[in-house]
Image (cartoon, helix red, strand yellow):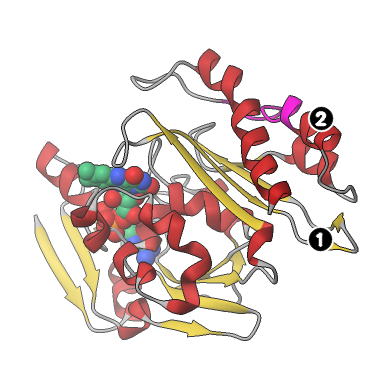
Amino acid sequence: MRVESYATLAEAARAMGPDAVFMAGGTLVMRDVNAGTSASRIVRSADPVLTEIRSTGDGVSIGAGVTMAQALANRDLAFLSSVARSVGGPQVRNMATIGGNIFAHHPYGDFAVALLALGARVVLAGQGAAKPLEDVLRERGRSSTSPIIAAIEVPRPRDPRAFAFAKISRIKPKGVSVMSIAAHLPREGGRIRGARIAFGAMGPTPLRATAAERVLEGQSLDAATIARAAQLACDGLDPPTDALASAWYRREVAGTHLKRLLEKMERG
Ligand SMILES: Cc1cc2nc3c(=O)[nH]c(=O)nc-3n(C[C@H](O)[C@H](O)[C@H](O)COP(=O)(O)OP(=O)(O)OC[C@H]3O[C@@H](n4cnc5c(N)ncnc54)[C@H](O)[C@@H]3O)c2cc1C
């Protein structure tokens, strides 16, 4: 295994190829290397862009190499601190990056669930305009060379109570997800405008619960609306069966967990 370190992301992006894997914190890549990955080169970059956290007025631009621990320590990212804290234990959080979380396969990817609910956009190294995280998740693993993420642009919720996250796991505090849920429900005049709900561990990548979003859109967050949204929680989702839970179980409990999260938001 050859390890190549590049000063800039542009050089790292040029060095990528079907035989190479980009490594950030390495919490997953090193596991694959130990298990015998098919890649023969590890590409790294020390570009300072990767660790930059910058306020952009109505949002925050987060370098893809920012770790969960760094996110927890940054006041601009206070709205994401419960999400960062939900990832692994302290040792994992010291290494695990936000960019890596976007490529982490089930049952991982809790941070990406929150980013999806917040409508984050992704800046790819060497490419111009940022693209929706949804597109990156959809295209994940489809080509032999994946692009390198430079930064993630996250809109900051205008009202912190409009965003909520829950991770459902069997072992606390460090268990992996049976599922994770994030909801962003901005309100205007008491009505929800731009509802976004995302689930993790309910499909091959973090996915939006669009049927539940449609129920919430334009409504006030009351018991009847919450009940209707919870009923449709699983529409369009394709939960896996694994050692943590069966697909049947995930389908059975998803609505209840969504209902609890929305009720918590309703109480403020
Ligand atoms: C004990 C343990 C517990 C864990 N618990 C959790 C948990 O609770 N929740 C959770 O979500 N995850 C968990 N993880 C998984 C993992 O630590 C996180 O998902 C982490 O965020 C991955 O980031 P990384 O920097 O370590 O990724 P790496 O291992 O460096 O990379 C992972 C993948 O992402 C790609 N990648 C990394 N950075 C970029 C980039 N900038 N651009 C493009 N591709 C990139 C790599 O090529 C690779 O395919 C756990 C892992 C371990 C070992």
SS at mark 2?
Answer: helix
Residue 1 point in image, percent of width and height: 8, 54
Assess disc 2: are there few (<14), some (14-19) or many (≥20) residues with their C-alpha within 10 Å of its C-alpha. Answer: some
Secondary structure at badge 1 equals strand
Decide: is 107 above or below 266: above
Residue 126 seen: no
* Placement of 183 over or under 43, stated as above or below: above
| Mark 1 CB lies closer than 8 A to ligand 1 | no
Residue linked to disc 2 = 228
Q: Position of residue 254 (x, y in %)?
A: 60, 27
The magenta stretch spans which residues?
230-238
> Is residue 231 part of the magenta span, yes or no?
yes
Q: Residue at x 46, y 15 (%)?
A: 246
Q: Alpha-carbon distance for marks 1 and 2?
A: 18 Å
Which amino acid type is shown beneath numbered disc 1?
Arg
- Foreground: 147 or 29? 29
Please provide percent x and percent y for residue 76.
49, 78
- Residue in view at x 15 percent, y 69 percent: 4
Q: Is the residue under label 2 in contact with that under label 1 (CB below 8 Å)?
A: no
129 drawn magenta: no
**Relative horizontal placement of residue 93, taking residue 209 as reference (left or right):** left
Query: Which disc is residue 187 wearing?
Result: 1
Answer with mark 1 or mark 2, whichever residue precedes in sequence. 1
Amino acid at dot 2: Arg
